[in-house]
């Protein structure tokens, strides 16, 4: 990573909720649809402690990923890196940490929903993910 600064990945705690919300406000995928508020993030932390991963660069949170295992497959949500810190390997680091978590929990496959945009497609392809041609995502509000 550039600048010699250390970037580490750690699980989020309650004290991180506000900074995570601020990061998502400016850096989450434009394709993300879930509304963001403190209660939603706190519910995730309570439901699956360790799922919300933070990239910490000298004390500043520069990226996030949610890596969850539901007993069937692993999934990565909310991969987001602050724009000033992109193309420095932070996304790759977050996904790698998420994959380690999911593998340890028993997952043998992991998927992520991405945008039909060159950036996300190039990113997922570069880190070894294969686009499922013809797959569509169906969704409904409950
Ligand atoms: C997608 C995203 C998370 C990538 O994070 P990042 O920290 O910049 O990714 P990395 O630096 O680890 O990139 C790893 C490799 O992916 C590829 N890559 C990443 N972003 C790319 C881009 N915009 N265009 C082309 N290739 C890209 C490159 O091969 C890169 O390696 P390189 O920089 O050595 O060439 C970041 O751009 C982001 O937060 N985007 C907005 C939110 C979003 O779209 N999230 C994805 C939801 S599916």
Image: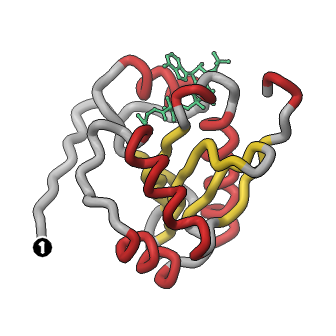
- Residue 113 in view in this figure: yes
Answer with the quarter of the image where residue 36 lies: bottom left
Q: What x and y, as percent, mark residue 136?
A: 20, 42
Task: Give the residue pinned by disc 1.
Answer: 142
For ligand 1, tell me if the residue under mark 1 lies within 8 Å. Answer: no
Kindly identify the residue that appears in the image at 48 percent across and 53 percent down: 76
Q: What x and y, as percent, mark residue 124?
A: 50, 31
| Left/right of residue 26 with respect to residue 88 in the rendered view | left
The one of 110 and 1 positioned closer to us in this rendering: 1
Q: Residues within 10 Å of mark 1 (few under 14, many from 20)?
A: few
Q: What x and y, as percent, mark residue 47?
A: 47, 82
- 76 shown above or below 62: below
| Left/right of residue 22 with respect to residue 60 in the rendered view | left
Kindly identify the residue that appears in the image at 60 percent across and 37 percent down: 91
- Residue 106 in view in this figure: no
Kindly identify the residue that appears in the image at 26 percent across and 59 percent down: 35
């Amino acid at each position: 990573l550039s600048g010699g600064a250390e970037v580490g990945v750690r699980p989020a705690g309650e004290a991180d909720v506000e900074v995570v919300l601020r990061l998502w406000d400016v850096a989450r995928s434009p394709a993300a649809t879930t509304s963001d508020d403190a209660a939603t993030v706190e519910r995730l932390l309570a439901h699956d402690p360790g799922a919300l991963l933070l990239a910490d660069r000298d004390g500043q949170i520069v990226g996030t990923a949610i890596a969850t295992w539901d007993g069937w497959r692993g999934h990565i949500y909310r991969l987001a890196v602050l724009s000033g810190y992109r193309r420095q390997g932070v996304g790759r680091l977050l996904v790698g940490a998420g994959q380690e978590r999911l593998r340890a929990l028993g997952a043998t496959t992991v998927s992520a929903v991405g945008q039909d945009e060159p950036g996300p497609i190039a990113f997922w392809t570069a880190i070894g993910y294969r686009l499922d041609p013809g797959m569509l995502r169906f969704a409904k509000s409950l």
